[in-house]
Image: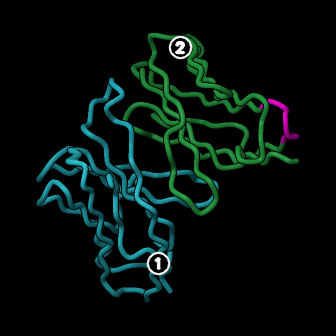
Chain colours: A cyan, B green
């Protein structure tokens, strides 16, 4: 089944304890992206990657890191989590990044709910 | 800026009525406008999209209209049903999303 898989789905952690949220897709998609969803703020992009070893900041990159060593994986790293990073996180992918075509239809993962105490 | 403004933030309609959600953008280079639906506790999923070379696109009970001159596009849902209740997000090129509209369809 074609899908985007995120883990963990739920996590409660404490301030300053490094954590990684994994994201994997099995569709050979070039483009991958991380969003956070907060009430009233919609989906805000954290980081995105157009292909292996190519990553770039989105709208809210502060406090996050990513890597894209393989095409299928795009982990989100919180080196020193803080309470304001409590949120619902979505990983998404699309076949390719093509700004002016329909090839950028996003497939989302199921979401990871993170609470930082 | 490159933000997408979405209105209203919440919308309640009676079952069978129509619902309209509107988004405005500022980047005149935008030419791809998708709409995503997120049911409670689920992930967002694309429901319809439109490119700037057309003014309207329909898919059964949903339609999207685009006014390039005024830089706004709208989602229209006719004959609403309880299963249409969800959060709807508009987006544009570079997949900048609006803040979302909570649609409640009352039966």
- Under circle 2, the secondary element is loop
Q: Is residue A91 above or below residue B78?
A: below
- Under circle 1, the secondary element is strand
Question: Quick check: is A105 in the magenta stretch?
Answer: no
Instruction: Using the rendered image, report if marks 1 and 2 lie on a common chain.
Output: no
Give residue B23's mark. none
Q: Where is residue B23 in the image (x, y as percent from the top left)?
A: 61, 31
Q: Is residue B38 left or right of residue B46?
A: right
Q: Which residue is drawn at 50% across and 36% down?
A: B91
Q: Position of residue A28 (x, y in %)?
A: 20, 48
Say which of B15 and A13 sits in front.
B15
Q: Mark 1 points at which residue?
A: A10
What kind of secondary structure does the magenta stretch mostly adopt? loop
First to last magenta residue range: B13-18
Inter-mark Cα distance, 1 to 2 = 41 Å
Q: Residue at x 41, y 39 (%)?
A: B95
Q: Residue at x 77, y 47 (%)?
A: B82
Q: Position of residue A53 (x, y in %)?
A: 11, 53
Q: Where is residue B85 in the image (x, y as percent from the top left)?
A: 72, 48
Say which of B39 and A31 sits in front.
B39
Q: How crowded is mark 1: few (under 14 residues within 10 Å), some or many (20 or more)?
A: few
Read off the chain for label 2.
B
Question: Quick check: is B15 in the magenta stretch?
Answer: yes
Q: In this view, does B85 lie above or below A36?
A: above
Q: Is residue A69 left or right of residue A1?
A: left
Read off the chain for label 1.
A
Q: In this view, does B11 lie above or below B17?
A: below
Give residue B68's mark. 2
């Amino acid at each position: 089944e074609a899908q985007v898989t995120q883990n963990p789905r739920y996590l409660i952690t404490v301030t300053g304890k490094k954590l990684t949220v994994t994201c994997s897709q099995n569709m050979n998609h070039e483009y991958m992206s991380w969003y956070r969803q907060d009430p009233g703020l919609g989906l805000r992009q954290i980081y995105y990657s157009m292909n292996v070893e190519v990553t770039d900041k989105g709208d809210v990159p502060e406090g996050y890191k990513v890597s894209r060593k393989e095409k299928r994986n795009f982990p989100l790293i919180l080196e020193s989590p803080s309470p304001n990073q409590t949120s619902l996180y979505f990983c998404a992918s699309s076949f390719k990044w093509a700004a002016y075509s329909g090839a950028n239809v996003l497939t989302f993962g199921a979401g990871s709910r993170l609470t930082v105490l | 800026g490159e933000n997408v403004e979405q209105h209203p933030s919440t919308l309640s309609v009676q079952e069978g009525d129509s619902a309209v959600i509107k988004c405005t953008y500022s980047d005149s280079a935008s030419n791809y406008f998708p709409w995503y639906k997120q049911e409670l506790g689920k992930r967002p999923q694309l429901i319809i999209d439109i490119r700037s070379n057309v003014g309207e696109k329909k898919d059964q009970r949903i339609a999207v209209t685009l006014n390039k001159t005024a830089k706004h596009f709208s989602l229209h849902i006719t004959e609403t049903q309880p299963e249409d209740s969800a959060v709807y997000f508009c987006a544009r090129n570079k997949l900048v999303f609006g803040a979302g509209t909570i649609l409640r369809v009352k039966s």
